[in-house]
Every structure is written in C-alpha cells, then in structure tokens.
C-alpha cells in the first residue's frame, strides 16, 4: 500500500549531454548521458526499488515474482518504459517497428512512443513524418539521400505533447529534453545519422535501411489527438492520449496547485513522474514527500491518492498487454 519509488538507469549516447545533472540534479556517471531510464523493466536497463519491502528488486523481478502488485495482469514482460532524453545533439533519423515485425525480427515488443517536451531551445523542431507518397518513392529518396525533400520539420516548445506511433519516421533535434512514455522495447532502425563518427569507436554508427523502409508507414498521416482537460479547483488533469488511438498506453498530466484527489479507473497500476515542483502524495493515510525528478509506481492496492503542493506530473497506464 505504498508507492514504489525507483532508482534509474543511465545510458550514455553519442548525442547526450549533462542537463540531467545541471537542470535535474541527478548524480550522473561520466560521459554524454542521453537517456535516463526512470521506470524500466527492460533487460538493457532495469530500474530498482529504493523503498519498502521490495527495496533492491528491479521492476522486472517485481513483474515476475510479485505480479499481485500489478493486479495479476497477464503478459510475459512489463509493457511500458518511461525515460528522460537529453538531446545535446540531434538524434539519428529513425523509425520503430510494430509488434508483429518486432516479434518476428527482434524477438521483443514493437515501439510506439510519445514525448512530453520538458524544455526546448528557441526555434526547436523535431523530424516527424515524411513526404513520400509510395514505398518506392520512399526508398528512392532514402537511397539518394534526399533528406531535404523527404523529411518533415515539426516545431515544438516546452509543454507540447507528441504521439509517435510505430512506423513514424522521427528524430529529436538538439536542444530538446523530453519525457518519453513508450512500449518496453529497445529496437531502433536508423535511416540517417548525419554521417557522424562515434568518438569511442572511430566509426559511423550502423544504419538499418531495409528495415526502415519495411516498417515505415506510407504515406505519413498525423494522428488526430483529442486532448482533454478537466478542472479540479485550481488543479487539473489533462488527458493527452488513450485508447482507441493509443492501444498500448494512456498518458496524463496532473497539474497540482494546492490539492488534487484522484481515483484510479480500470487500470491495474499507474506510473508517475514528477517533472516540476514539490509537494506530497498521501496513500492509505501515509504521506510521502515528492519533488521534481521523482519517479514511482502506484501498485494495484492503491486505489486512490491525494496530491498536495505545487506539482506538475506526467502519469501513464498500460493499455493492451502483449
């Protein structure tokens, strides 16, 4: 009956920086830290519980050994992964497969994801989608390196939400920090990486042109989001995405200005990331202090909770379980 607070896993990336230390106060290892895996059961970087009777176990172990914490739902793997990404330089232009392709070729889940923009330098933009009308045209433009005419630019600013279904060509560009909610997958197909060289290996990173052409949705169609906001006094809950548009997860913003009392619906557990402010959460009569940078799971036994203070939170719940 208590939140499961988590220790993260850090990933060094060629495009990473140090904002997770300077802006978020995290104790980072040396290097260009691009990804902070906050709530993860993926074998490439599981997060571990830092409080209570499950202290020291990672989320994958909880899923395998204590499924009651998640309402005894079915599924071989914990389905979601929450990250913070710091794009000190631009990420590769990439695309992710859907479940069917990923299971056949990579033996893991596909990767639909979404971003909440935590910060963005002036005039920041994403690569999002493409202009090819047929797969043959897509292949021709990729083979010719005609990135200027192929790729769409998508301006973003702090507070924006972007939904990235599998099959969407995309890239975070330099100067953007996002909180990412995604399926628990680490499969990425690169189709362009700016011809840069990895300082550690002295080589260019691998591209995956055939796979990229195979899995890209053609033509690109922007998803039609229906973002809704419900006021609770001076606080509010904003629903960014949910089923049927997003079968894998629902994502919410909880903006707390004073207090906000919430009850869980039909989802068996909730993932929570505090992205600004400080305050507290009260569950079953017990109060826990929370602040920017905290990440935790509200397990099945917690049906309702109260938030107090001044807080901005991104929460997510799993949809279909693979």
Image (cartoon, rainbow, N blue to C red):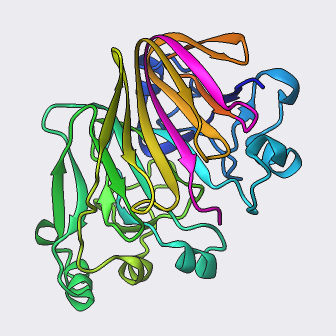
What is the x, y in percent for residue 259? 46, 12
Q: Which residues are magenta?
A: 299-322
Taking the image as shown, residue 318 lies to the left or right of residue 158, namely right
Report the front residue among 209 and 285: 285
The answer to whether 322 appears left or right of 147 in the picture is: right
Quadrant that contains the C terminus: bottom right
Residue depicted at x 36% and y 81%: 213
Query: Would you say 66 lies left or right of 317 here?
Result: right
Q: Is 211 within the magenta?
A: no
Q: Is residue 90 visible?
A: no
Q: For residue 47, what is the image quadrant?
A: top right
Q: Is residue 304 magenta?
A: yes
- What x and y, as percent, mark residue 137? 19, 87
Residue 166 placed where, x, y %? Answer: 42, 67
Q: At 79% from the left edge and 40% from the top edge, which residue is drawn?
A: 69
* On screen, residue 29 above or below 181: above
One can see residue 111 in this view: yes
Toward the viewer: 101 or 208?
101
* Number of on-image labels: 0
Which residue shows up at 45% across the image and 44% down it? 251
Q: Quadrant of the N terminus?
A: top right
Q: Of helix, strand and loop, which mostly describes the magenta segment?
A: strand
């Amino acid at each position: 009956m208590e939140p499961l607070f988590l220790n993260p896993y850090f990933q060094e990336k060629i495009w990473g920086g140090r904002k997770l230390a300077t802006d978020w106060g995290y104790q980072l290892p040396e290097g260009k830290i691009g990804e902070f895996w906050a709530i993860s059961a993926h074998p490439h970087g599981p997060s571990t519980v830092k409080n209570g009777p499950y202290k020291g176990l990672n989320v994958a172990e909880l899923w395998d050994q204590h499924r009651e914490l998640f309402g005894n739902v079915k599924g071989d793997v914990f389905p979601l992964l929450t990250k913070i990404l710091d794009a000190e330089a631009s990420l590769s232009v990439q695309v992710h497969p859907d479940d069917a392709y990923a299971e056949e070729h990579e033996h893991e889940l596909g990767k639909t994801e979404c971003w909440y923009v935590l910060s963005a330098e002036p005039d920041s933009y994403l690569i999002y989608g493409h202009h090819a009308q047929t797969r043959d045209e897509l292949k021709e433009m990729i083979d010719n390196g005609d990135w200027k005419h192929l790729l769409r630019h998508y301006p973003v600013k702090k507070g924006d939400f972007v939904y990235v279904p599998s099959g969407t060509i995309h890239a975070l560009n330099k100067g953007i920090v996002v909180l990412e909610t995604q399926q628990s997958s680490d499969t990425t197909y690169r189709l362009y990486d700016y011809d840069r060289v990895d300082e550690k290996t002295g080589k260019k990173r691998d591209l995956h042109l055939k796979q990229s052409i195979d899995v890209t949705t053609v033509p690109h169609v922007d998803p039609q989001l229906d973002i809704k906001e419900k006021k609770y006094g001076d606080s509010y809950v904003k629903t960014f995405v949910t089923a049927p548009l997003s079968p894998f997860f629902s994502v919410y913003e909880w903006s707390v200005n004073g207090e906000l009392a919430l009850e869980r619906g039909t989802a068996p557990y909730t993932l929570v990331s505090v992205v600004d402010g400080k305050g507290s959460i009260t569950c079953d009569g017990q109060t826990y202090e929370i602040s920017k940078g905290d990440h935790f799971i509200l397990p099945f036994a917690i049906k309702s909770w109260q938030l107090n203070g001044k807080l901005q939170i991104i929460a997510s719940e799993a949809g279909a379980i693979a």
